[in-house]
Every structure is written in structure tokens, then in C-alpha cells.
Image (cartoon, rainbow, N blue to C red):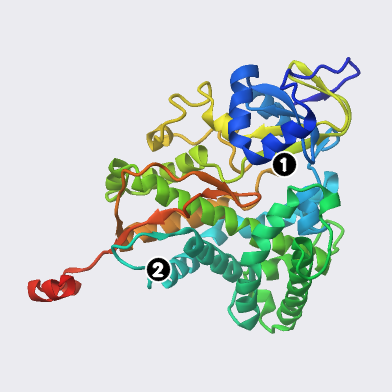
Amino acid sequence: MAEATTDPIRLPPGPRLPPLVQGLLFLGARQRVLDAAARRYGRAFTVKVPIFGTAVVISDRALIKELFTTGPDLISRPANLGSVLGPGSTFSLNGDEHRERRKLLVPPFHGKRMSSYEAIIEEEVRRETATWPEGVEFATLEPMMRITLSAILRTVFGAQGPALDELRDLLPPMVPLASKMAILPRALRRDLGPWSPWGRVQRARHRYNEIIAGLIAEARADPRFEDRGDVLALLLSARYEDGSPIADDHVADELLTLLAAGHETTATTLSWVIERLRRHPSVLQRLEHDDGELRQAVIWEVQRTRPVVEFTARIVGTRIRLGDWVLPEGAAVIASFGLAHRCESNFRDAMAFDPDRFLGSNPDNYTWIPYGGGIRRCIGAAFANMEMTVTLRTLLRDFTFGTTTAAGEPQHSRGVAMAPGAGGRAVVFRRRTPAETPHEEQREQVHA
């Protein structure tokens, strides 16, 4: 882990362009800029970018391990996402407050509860795909968004109704807009009226708070509250070591964190899964006879080659030594998921899509990092992985997918998440049992 020091500051080398130019390049062509800098300066370099100012970008395994194992007394999470999600979100908490909250959030997303959520996921997949067209190319990103949003809403609140229907309409436009605003300096996040971007986010958030307050009141009034296993009930029942509950406004912030992070990134990854499999027919064919091991490896490899979140950042609280470097107070350290995943010293033939690299072994925690790491690792990682494996299993059971020789879809920024530029397009054909297969005469009529 990194350690405090009084040694002279020593930053890695980096581009000498003016900060404004670096910032514009970083915002407009982040991946290309980072790849070019890594080729020139190696696996640690210094940039000057918006929000973070002076930032050290790392992709070296040893440095990432040091970063993830360093305590919150020396480094902390930047406040940009927390300012959007609210002061009660784990993204906004640090130190003991963060650790205590995390303990309360772990139980709903681990252990036996996970298997109880699988039926919900499968039901939502089949509900959404019931109207998928056959033999016609279409984008999967929005359908995946609806699947994951409905699944997380039912998991969090345990039921369906008008309030959840309103959240289904409210969150899809709110989350990507808030994500884009989160990467802007705080000075640009101003409410300039109902049609301004931040004004729209604020009004949607106000309505969200009203809906959640109503759902909290309904949950507390439920005579079967003690028997409920949904996330809302578990958070309302949770108690800190001193016996105090999580404040209602903090529950609302945590639920928004779960709803936002728990559907957009998962849905985007699922669209990338479809995009990658269509271009790797041999892998798609092998999945026809898979017992689950290859399916898991495919998801891990998609997350490696197409990470939907590009980096995680920490802010240095006091001067520290990180590897060979000495970083000043206030500097940012950015662990680049993409650079780490594309690094040949971390993954042989790193640019190839090769799920076999994960067969028989789990990913390394400091080279494969789509969920971050350390005490800040995504708390919903196990849930997201379960949701993706169940969704892919259900899709492969119900459909065959057409393949393509077209070039891969470019990466498109949705703010926080990087999505397939064409929406993860698919061509599907519904599987039919023999009894459902049309007779030759009927088939001729269908294709006439």
C-alpha cells in the first residue's frame, strides 16, 4: 500500500501540452489519448485534466494494488459522482462512515439472496424479448436497459405498481444526463431553469425523492414488513452498531446509487456481449453446448475488452509514496481500466477477444478491474454478474443469433458509461420446439 512521506514530490513524466489542450483531448478522445500516452511514457504518467487537475494515470499491476490497498486516511474518492447521487450515497462517504455503511449494504447482494433474484431476472428478460423481431437487425441497448431497470426495481422494492412504473419512466432520461453532468466541473452544474440540463436533473431528482418517500412509508405500513426480503425493507431494517437506522434521505440516496449503477452499466455490458458474440461465431457456437463456464468467461472477457466504465479515481489526502513516485496532497490517481486490460504484461495477446483465457481460473483482482477494487469495489458486483449470466443464459435458450463480418461498433460515451456506438445491434431467430415448427406448407406461406 502507499505510505505517507515527506520526500520531495516526484511525478511520472507526461505530456507537456497546455492543460486546456490536454483537457479538451481527454474529453474528446480519451481512449486514444491515454493509449498514446501509455505508449510513450509507460504504465504511469501525469496529465492535467478537467475536474481532477494534476492526475497520475496508472495501469501497472503493482501500482494498482498499492492504490486499492491504501487506507482512506491517505486517499479518498472524488466528490463528482457523490454530488449527483447525494450526500447519503456510499460514493459520498469516506472513512469510518463509509465502512459502516458498506457493512449494511453487503447482505442484500450476497449469499442465498442472490439465487432468489434469478427468477425475477429471467421473467424480465422473457417479458422484454417477447416482441423482439426475427431476422431484422435492431439495437439491443435500450431493451437491455429496460430489462435491467425493471429487474433492479423489483429487486429493490419487491413488488410492482404505479410508483415503480413512474420510476421506469423517470430514471432512463435522468441517469445518462446526470452521468454526463457528473464529469463536468461543479461550477457548470447550475440550475438555469426547467430546460437547462442541470435543472432537468434537479427536477427529476425532486420527483424521485417524493416517490421514494412514499414507498418508504408504504413499506413501514406493510403488516408483512418483517417477512420482506427486498432491498428497501432490508435497508430500513438495518442498524448500525449503536442501534441507529440509516436516515430516510440517505436510504433514498443509496437506492438511487443502486438503481443508477445497477442498471445502466449492466445493460451496456450486455449490449457489448451481443456485439462481441456476433463477431465471434466460433465462441457463439460453443455456447450452444456450454454448462456455464464458457458463458461466465465470455462475460469476463467482454468486461475486459469493452469496460463500460473507463477508470476509477482517488484523491491524495496527504503527500504519499506510490511505487517510485511521490505524489502531492490534492493530486488525483486514476486507475485506467482500459489501459490495464489492454496491457500485454497483464494479458497475453491483450487486443484479442479470447474468453478461453478465463477458463479454469478467476480474474486477477489487480489486472481485471471493471468493478474497481479495495474498499471501494462495486458493492453490486456479484448481483451484476448474476444478472448478466442469467440474461445471457435465457437469451441463448430462447434465440439463435445471426453473426456478422462487419467491423466492431465504436465506443460511444454516455457520460459515465461507454456504450456500443450503434446500440449493440442484433439479429435473432426464435427457437421453436418440434410441435411449434410450421409444416412445409405453412413455412412456404410464411416466407411467401
Nearest the camera: 364 or 51?
A: 51
- Residue 419 x, y percent position in the rendering: 54, 50
Instruction: In the rendered view, tell whether residue 224 sits above or below residue 366.
Output: below
The residue that appears at 45% across and 34% down in the rendered structure is 361
Say what amino acid the circle numbered 2 marks. Answer: Thr
Instruction: In the rendered view, tell whether residue 39 sits above or below residue 377.
Output: above
Please name which of the two marks, 1 or 2, marks the residue nearer to the observer. Answer: 2
The residue that appears at 38% across and 72% down in the rendered structure is 130
Q: Earlier in the sequence, mark 1 or mark 2?
A: 2
Mark number displayed over residue 332 = none
Number of numbered tags placed on the structure image: 2
Quadrant into which the N terminus falls: top right
The reply to whether residue 83 is in sight is yes
Say what amino acid the circle numbered 1 marks. Answer: Ile
State left or right for residue 331 relative to residue 183: right
Mark number displayed over residue 129 = 2
The residue that appears at 44% across and 66% down in the rendered structure is 125
- Residue 55 x, y percent position in the rendering: 77, 30
- Residue 175 x, y percent position in the rendering: 66, 61
State left or right for residue 405 relative to residue 158: left
Is disc 1 placed on a helix, strand or loop? helix
- Residue 354, image quadrant: top left
The residue that appears at 82% across and 50% down in the rendered structure is 93
For mark 2, does the 10 Å Cα neighbourhood hold few (<14), some (14 to 19), or many (20 or more) residues? some
- Residue 288 x, y percent position in the rendering: 28, 51
Residue at numbered disc 1: 375
State left or right for residue 272 relative to residue 81: left
State left or right for residue 431 relative to residue 40: left
Instruction: In the rendered view, tell whether residue 402 sits above or below residue 251.
Output: above
For mark 1, does the 10 Å Cα neighbourhood hold few (<14), some (14 to 19), or many (20 or more) residues? some
Is disc 2 placed on a helix, strand or loop? helix
